[in-house]
Image: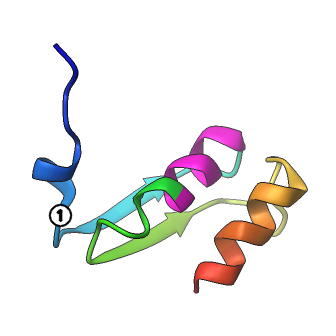
Amino acid sequence: MLLDLKIYIRAKDLIIFGGGDSALDWSVELAGIAKSISLVHRRDEFRGAPHTEKLMRDLS
């Protein structure tokens, strides 16, 4: 059975911790569903793919 994350995330304020590929991918993927997304990372630069970082930044 495939879990539909939309029923848990819709209209919620989310906090995602990390700066790698997974954190950036989830930020982009959930941006159209969640009310808001905050990405918390301890460094000034992200370790994820530059293309995904650009997608994430373009959403804000």
Q: Residue at label 1?
A: 10
For the N terminus, the image quarter is: top left
Residue found at x 65% / y 69%: 56
Amino acid type assigned to the residue bearing label 1 in the image:
Arg
- Magenta stretch: helix, strand or loop mostly: helix
Judged from this view, the residue extending furthest toward the left is 7
Residue found at x 84% / y 64%: 45
> Where is residue 55, by image quadrant?
bottom right
Judged from this view, the residue extending furthest toward the bottom is 60
Magenta segment boundaries in residue numbering: 21-28
17 to the left or right of 10: right
In x, y percent, where is residue 36? 34, 77
In x, y percent, where is residue 22? 61, 39
Residue found at x 30% / y 65%: 33
> Where is residue 11, by image quadrant?
bottom left
- Asked which colour scheme the image uses, the reply is rainbow
